[in-house]
Amino acid sequence: MTIRHHISDSLLMAHAAGTLPEAFGLVVATHISLCDDCRARAGAFDAVGGALMDEAPAAAMSEGSLAAVMARLDRRIEIQRPIPRRDPRVPAPLSDYIGGSLDTVRWRPLGGGVRQAILPTGREAVARLLWIPGGQSVPDHGHRGMELTLVLQGAFRDETDRFGPGDLEIADEEMEHTPVAEPGPDCICLAATDAPLRFNSLLPRLVQPFVRI
Amino acid sequence: MSLPTRKSGCMRENRGICSPAGDERKADVTGQTEETDWVALMLAIRDHRDETAFARLFQHFAPRVKGFLMKSGTASAQAEEYAQDVMAVVWQKAHLFDPSRASLSTWIFTIARNRRIDAIRKARHPEPEELFWGPESEPDQADVYEMQQENARLTRAVQSLPEKQRALIERAFFGDLSHRELADETGLPLGTIKSRIRLALERLRLHMS
């Protein structure tokens, strides 16, 4: 997997700081699971957090706190081996949200063969899986906030570039785009938005309140 | 205190040089001033369930975790409770600490961050897939040494950032800035530590395959 589109520094820093909405955090953690370059960059930002924690004024623990923690420690040495992916397209962080496989996701039609499934995250932002049949387009739209789109299978192109497996597109307020899935295998993406999308044609706008896109 | 005896024996020969320079520069609760080899203590916990090692880690890190959480706006009683939880996780997940990719401060910071999100925002912090060496092997001691040194350098670099820039980074990490308020140009000197971690990941991947 050759990944060409990566997470921005600001998103990685917010992820390290723990201030990203859960839906964005899910996309970031899923990309990191596929991309060791971003895993290393994320590790560097974590190290900044570690340095700040070292520097923060220490606050004395209450008396007996060590004993309280000692009392609840499990003395066995138990090393859990990492569980292999049930579905090779689905890294662990995403797997937790969909029960392991893309094959058991409950898709809802969005029209034109495009399907989606909303994932259960906190309400600050919405995470969804999108299924776009090969050669099909997603209705052209703009964004009120930020939209992150991570390709899990297949590929899409829009006005900016081509995005293949593992690639992450970051779209902001200024961007209007019409993503088109490449002919070939259907394109499956994990996307997150922090405000509803703004469609440019009437039909998607009409169904928007019902399908939550 | 017993020392780790795993086959590569990294910490036995290496005791004292794996620790970040100056990590123990302030005399802490135990009154010690010499450098402490946190990595060796961590391995003793992992391999031998060494309670003395855990007590030393607790005395050093629990007050820092609590202080960090309080600085992030957590009330004292809650911060106390979360710091205890964090230290319990340190024990429980000892096998996931990879000293070729992070310092102990960094690793404990990530556990504290996740605990805070869990509690305060009632949301999850999705974590990337875990990668670790498994029970039979561990990273090269030279990589561990370099990583710990690199962390010490980064800590010094963060300390000596211009005041304005440092304040911005602190506000980001103490939860006062949203992702929209952060810039892609952080001005943090992260190039070398990033390359170090990348190298360690390559070695780990090679080992895993």
Image (cartoon, coloured by chain):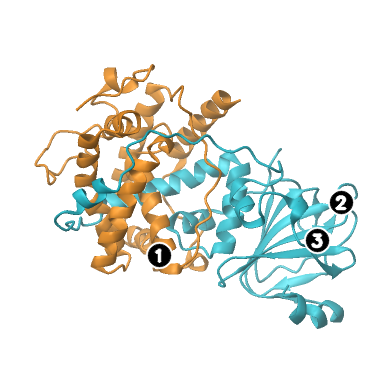
Chain colours: A cyan, B orange
Query: What's the residue at 89%, 47% (across, down)?
Result: A184
Say whether residue A158 is visible.
no
- How far apart marks 2 and 1 lie (CA) works out to 43 Å
Q: Which residue is mark 2?
A: A182
Taking depth in this image into account, of A141 and B186 the one nearest to the observer is A141
Give residue B178's position: percent from left, percent from top: 47, 68
Query: What's the residue at 37%, 62% (across, down)?
Result: B168
Q: Mark 2 is on which residue type? A: Glu
Relative to residue A18, is residue B203 depicted above or below?
above
Give residue A202's position: percent from left, percent from top: 85, 81
Chain of residue at mark 1: B
Extreme residue toward the left, this view = B31
- How far apart marks 3 and 2 lie (CA) works out to 9 Å
Say whether residue B63 is visible.
yes
Chain of residue at mark 2: A
Q: Where, quadrant-wise, is the N terminus of chain A in this rendering?
A: top right
Relative to residue B129, is residue A8 depicted above or below?
below
Residue A85: image quadrant is top right
Q: Mark 1 is on which residue type? A: Ala
Q: Residues within 10 Å of mark 3 (few under 14, many from 20)?
A: many
**Which element type, helix, strand or loop, lies under badge 3?**
loop
Q: Does residue B104 appear left or right of residue A38 in this picture?
A: left
Q: Which residue is mark 1?
A: B119
- How far apart marks 3 and 1 lie (CA) works out to 38 Å
**Which element type, helix, strand or loop, lies under badge 1?**
helix
Residue B135: image quadrant is top left
**Which element type, helix, strand or loop, lies under badge 2?**
loop
Query: What's the residue at 30%, 24% (across, down)?
Result: B4
Q: Given contact means CB atoms under 8 Å apart, are the residues at marks 3 and 1 in contact?
A: no
Q: Which residue is mark 3?
A: A179
Chain of residue at mark 3: A
